[in-house]
Amino acid sequence: MIRNMYLLLLVLVCLAGCRREPSVDAETLLAAMSQEADLVVTEVKIRKIAYYDSDATENIVLADPTTWRIGSRVAIVPVDIWLRYGYDLRELTLDAVRIDDERHAVEVRLPEPRVVDSGYAAEVNADEVVSIATGLRNPVGHETIEMIRKEAYEEVMQQDFTELVGKEVRYNAENVLGSIVRSLGFDHVTIIE
């Protein structure tokens, strides 16, 4: 009886020590990565407070009385912008994936992170817009508010988001790719620069 238990214990130790060798080539690994996780992104919401001053924006030509204005207009418009920033794993190539058989690991060179999707709310909350007019001027209208919002959106989209969320997106990519490579029999994934 004790002999059988020792034999069973020996078999269990041997099975636990035996590791399953990954039998996946780079093409299969790349296909799994692209299929199981086509995008690795972080969603970012930014509130931009846009300021409009007619004195700085509108052109007045002294020779043309139609451009003359008596008074000025000022508007403060909040713009809620959302974007998804990260990696499109469908852009990975065979050159970007390397299998290290000795370490049972995979090395991946990710494509450059980019804005995958973005936009801002279609409707304006009139309660949040501050519009002041002096002299004989009317307050800023809907058309001007839309122009202000569009310019604020374009200004935000010019930013480099790597500093803002680059580490988070890379961490997400390591987790997603790590779970994929572990399911294929590898121990871990390394993101290389």
Image: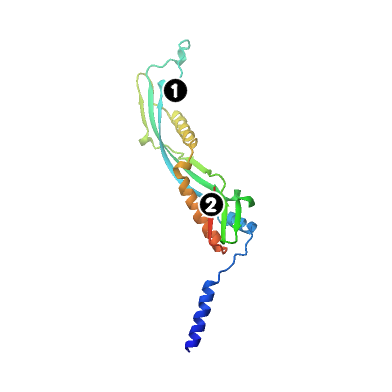
As measured in the structure, the alpha-carbon distance from the residue carrying label 1 to the one carrying label 2 is 47 Å
Element type where label 2 sits in the image: strand
**Residue at position x 63%, y 57% in the image:** 26
Q: Residue furthest bottom?
A: 1
Question: Is residue 3 depicted above or below 126 in this figure?
Answer: below
- Residue that badge 1 annotates: 57
**Residue at position x 64%, y 52% in the image:** 94
Front-lying residue, 65 or 26: 26
**Residue at position x 46%, y 49% in the image:** 168
Element type where label 1 sits in the image: helix
Amino acid at the residue labelled 2: Ile
Mark in the foreground, 1 or 2: 2
User: In the rendering, at what x and y percent does residue 162 appear?
Assistant: 48, 42
Q: Which mark is residue 190?
A: none
Amino acid at the residue labelled 1: Thr
Picture quadrant where residue 65 is located: top left
Front-lying residue, 31 or 94: 94
**Residue at position x 64%, y 57% in the image:** 27
- Position of 84 with respect to 98 (left or right) is left
Earlier along the polypeptide chain: callout 1 or callout 2? 1
User: In the rendering, at what x and y percent does residue 148 appear?
Assistant: 45, 30
Picture quadrant where residue 183 is located: bottom right
User: In the rendering, at what x and y percent does residue 87 appear?
Assistant: 54, 48
- Residue that badge 2 annotates: 191
Front-lying residue, 86 or 53: 86
Question: Is residue 143 depicted above or below 122 in this figure?
Answer: above
How many callouts does the rendering have? 2
